[in-house]
Image (cartoon, rainbow, N blue to C red):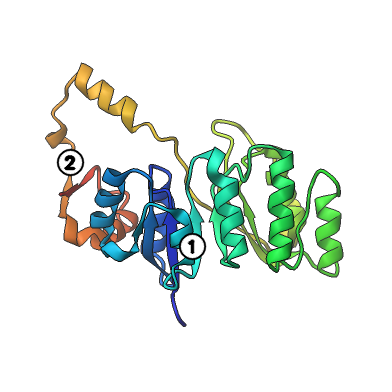
Amino acid sequence: MKKIRLGVVGVGGISGLHIGGTLNSKDAELVAICDNDPGTLAYKGDLYGIPENRRFSDYSKLIACPDVDAVSNCTPNNVHLEVLLAALKAKKPLITEKPMTLDEKEAEKALAAAKKAGATEVINCKDVDAVAKIMELTGNQGCDVVLETTGAPSIQNDTIKFLKKAGTITLIGWSSGADIPMDLSTLMRKEGNITTVFRYRNQHLKAIEQLIASPIPIEEIVSHEYPLEDLKRALEENIAHKDTIIKAVIKM
């Protein structure tokens, strides 16, 4: 099967999650990046081996690039809608970081654009009962795959109601530190599966400040080192050996 060629718009901190997943996927590859900061663009382009002709400062050019099949929108929240609309207009599949938009009015624009671009159905949870609508659309079967990205406890529990028998729920957003009630009885009756994706807050600036204020011998906690050209191997080994790798460093 042909790999999905992904272009990432906005290569700041959160993009690492999107790019890491792409690099470790057998079904996708990173082919283009876009950022309005020249230094970041150059650094990430070198890091991921992106050729100069597929490093863009204008997201519209990345979206229009014939080598890009799909778009990952990792821009600041206030830019999400315009990138989303541009990708939909070009009829390219996309992933948008949450929140999808800044407010309800923008969300309605996004849903309308998705419908126009060819989405089979779009659901505005403000206007309809999402569970009832999904069951109506699927002949009371439910969805094969449910991606939960809100982190809202009530929505997380509803994912089980959306699910088809033997389907899969992937929890991407999570309410940190909270106990989330879930209807495991229904999940078991449906023989459903739950997978998770770990999300984190970008705390590297605080970490750097702490190291400046109270230096510690960093080299003593580094258990593994890799040259930049072995980035793929480094990611694979760190995923496979989480219990034995304490801290890994990519040497630039």
Residue 48, x across and y down, in percent:
28, 59
Looking at the rendered structure, the kind of residue marked 1 is Ile
> Mark 2 highlights which residue?
222
Q: Position of residue 91 (x, y in %)?
A: 60, 68
Q: Give x and y (percent) for residue 126.
A: 81, 43
What secondary structure is marked by label 2?
loop
Question: Taking 246 as reference, is 141 above or below it?
Answer: below
Is 234 placed left or right of 104 in the picture? Answer: left
Q: Kindly tell me whether residue 141 is visible in this rendering.
A: yes
Identified at 26% across, 44% down, the residue is 39
Quote the CA–CA distance across marks 1 and 2.
39 Å
Q: Residue 143 falls in which quadrant of the image?
A: bottom right
Name of the residue lying farthest toward the bottom: 1
Sooner in the amino-acid sequence: mark 1 or mark 2: 1
Q: Give the secondary structure at mark 1.
A: helix
Is any part of residue 170 visible from this angle?
A: no
- Of 81 and 26, which appears nearest the observer? 81
> Residue at the spot x=54%, y=52% of the render?
83
Pointer 2: residues within 10 angstroms few (<14), some, or many (20+)? few
| Picture quadrant where residue 25 is located | bottom left
Instruction: State left or right for residue 6 relative to residue 181.
Output: left
Residue receiving disc 1: 63
Q: Nearer the viewer, residue 171 or 30?
A: 30
- Three-letter amino acid code at the position of disc 2: Val
Provide residue 179's location: percent of width, then percent of height: 62, 34
- Is residue 121 rendered to the left or right of residue 240? right
